[in-house]
Amino acid sequence: MREELIQKIKEAGVVGAGGAGFPTHVKVAAKAQIVIVNGAECEPLLRVDQQLMASQAAKVVMGLEIVMSITGAGEGIIALKSKYKDAIAALEKEIAGKPIRIHILNDFYPAGDEHLIVYESTGRLIPQGGIPLKVDCIVNNVETLINIVDAVAGKPVTDTYLTITGEVNQPMTIKLPIGTSIIAALGFAGYHDLEHMKIIEGGPMMGNIVDDVAQPITKTTKGLILLPQDHPLIKSKTLPSDKVLRQSRVSCMQCRYCTDLCPRYLLGHKIEPHKMMLMVKHLQGDENTMKMAFSCSECGVCEQYACIMGLSPRAVNAMLKHELSKMGIKPDPSPANRTVDPLRKHRKIPIKRLISRLALTQYDQSAPLNEQNYPVHNVAIKLCQHIGAPCKPSVKVGSKVKKGDAIAFPPTNGIGACLHASIDGVVKKITNSIFISSSEGSEK
């Protein structure tokens, strides 16, 4: 039965619905003591998980129970914020009499970081550079659990939920076929004129600027945020790397706020961003200091909240990680005697204050969940939208497909997840994506 469930999850192409998209059949094949539902949704403005937990609580709990049965876990934890009152009420009814508990989180950023959510809900410290399984835990996203229930029922992953917000007429959370273009998605929210505007895919802290609005949404797309191109957040995200380094050398005053507020440093990780900034300032430093960059989760607290000079230790860390990896240098083992900073509980970043610091207060509004079927007639399904190797197409140009048909599979000996047609139609082109078009409509 266990292997059958894992196989169904694999065949359905379930991946982590947020973050990097780790194939779920690989994650749940392990043994664990505790399964944690990451319902924190800590990125400002995004509204997907909190609404799914309220509207599909039974399915979320069912998915959690399936993962618990596969992994042999004796305890399930649903970790979510106290402000998600509708979700808490709905979930409490569903977990009655079950070995599952709700863990209430404060409204801080980045509560959804796996290292933080495991520590907050269990008191266990994941080793630096490690994964939750190192402390006998498995963490799953809310939408992932919903997809697991569908997978067991024989329904593959063909759609994804995402919040569309910012400078749109109707902020909303909707379900769209995977492969829908970003420009088409914005159109459903009532926005068509993108002149002098920029789009962030993901959340405002860790999301990236969209260079091509024709690019498709994927299994891991959770938000599209439309902002004016002169918005401070857009300016900071589009700052060239040479300017980031130049500013760091000239302006860093070694106040160490970036270190004192770093969520990973506060958990006892060997990372002190201010020391890396000092190294950049003087264009010299020892290898141990440089290797601190490996511990950076790139959450953005240092650049968007902590630094009073508007610098980006996060970007510096990312550059260092890239260069060290190119040189074949690996991170140090996790410190043996790690201790959590006693001031950690006083240095959590309040979401409301973060939203204000990001100049996003006017966009902090509801984005109601709308389950209607939106008319999408053209999709481009990326062959690589998960951790691992790109999938290999099993269809050809001209093939007729139905929604839910398997169209690509991961390499035999590689990690990956199957891909399925998200609309009925005909395969028009295959590049690094599979392009499918129905006989209706003409959106790009």
Image (tube, rainbow, N blue to C red):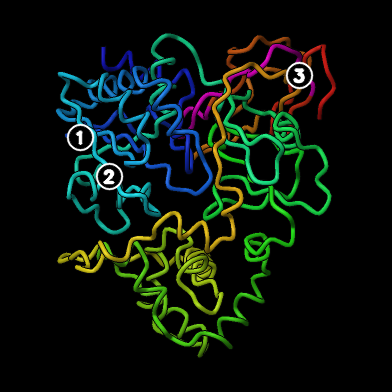
Magenta region: which residues? 410-428
Q: Is residue 304 left or right of residue 268?
A: right
Q: Secondary structure at mark 1?
A: strand
Disc 2 to disc 3, how far (Cα)?
Answer: 40 Å
Q: Amino acid at mark 1?
A: Ile
Which residue is painted at 62% across and 17% down in the image? 372
Which class describes the residues within 10 Å of circle 3: few (<14), some (14-19), or many (20+)?
many
Q: Main SS type for the magenta part?
A: loop
Q: Is residue 311 left or right of residue 189?
A: left
- Residue toward you, 143 or 359: 359
Which residue is painted at 69% across and 28% down in the image? 180
Q: Residue 375 at what x, y percent from top left?
A: 72, 18
Residue tagged 1: 34
Image quadrant in which you'd find residue 217: top right
Q: Secondary structure at mark 2?
A: helix
Residue tagged 2: 132
Which residue is painted at 76% across and 51% down in the image? 197
First in sequence, mark 2 or 3: give its number: 2
Q: Residue 9 at what x, y percent from top left?
A: 40, 20
Disc 1 to disc 3, how far (Cα)?
Answer: 42 Å
Q: Does 70 appear above or below 334?
A: above
Q: Is residue 243 magenta?
A: no
